[in-house]
Image: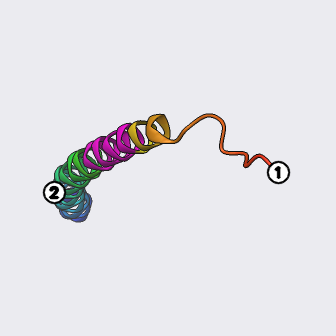
Amino acid sequence: MEAELKSLEAKLAQLIALCQQLRTENHQLRQDVAAAVSARRQLEDKISGATARLEALLQQIPEDTSVSQA
């Protein structure tokens, strides 16, 4: 009976350690996801700004760029 209790105690200690490790890993993963989402938003903003600038430049190009030949 004593050996069974020691074995159960050891298994419980392993489970507690694993649970703590997983909580720490989960916390780190949540931080990583938040950083990735923030970076994605920044990139989307840059793309949006670049798109707007390109559209503005395209509006400045004359429609008829062909040269008349005599």
Question: Coloured how?
Answer: rainbow
Which residues fall within the magenta stretch? 40-53
Give, as a three-letter code, the residue at label 1: Gln
Of the numbered discs in the image, which one, if any, rests on residue 60? none
Q: Is residue 50 left or right of residue 26?
A: right
Q: Quadrant of residue 7?
A: bottom left
C-alpha gap between disc 1 and disc 2:
74 Å
Q: Earlier in the sequence, mark 1 or mark 2?
A: 2
Pick the quarter of the image with the N terminus: bottom left
Principal SS element in the magenta part? helix
Foreground residue among 14 and 61: 61
Foreground residue among 35 and 5: 35
- Label 2: which residue? 24
Q: Position of residue 22 (x, y in %)?
A: 24, 54
Circle 1: element type: loop
Q: Mark 1 against mark 2, which lies toward the viewer?
A: 1
Give, as a three-letter code, the residue at label 2: Thr
Q: Is residue 46 left or right of residue 31?
A: right
- Label 1: which residue? 69
Q: Is residue 62 left or right of residue 22?
A: right
Q: Position of residue 58 (x, y in %)?
A: 49, 40
Foreground residue among 58 and 29: 58
> Residue at coordinates 32% horizontally, 50% vertically from top-left?
43
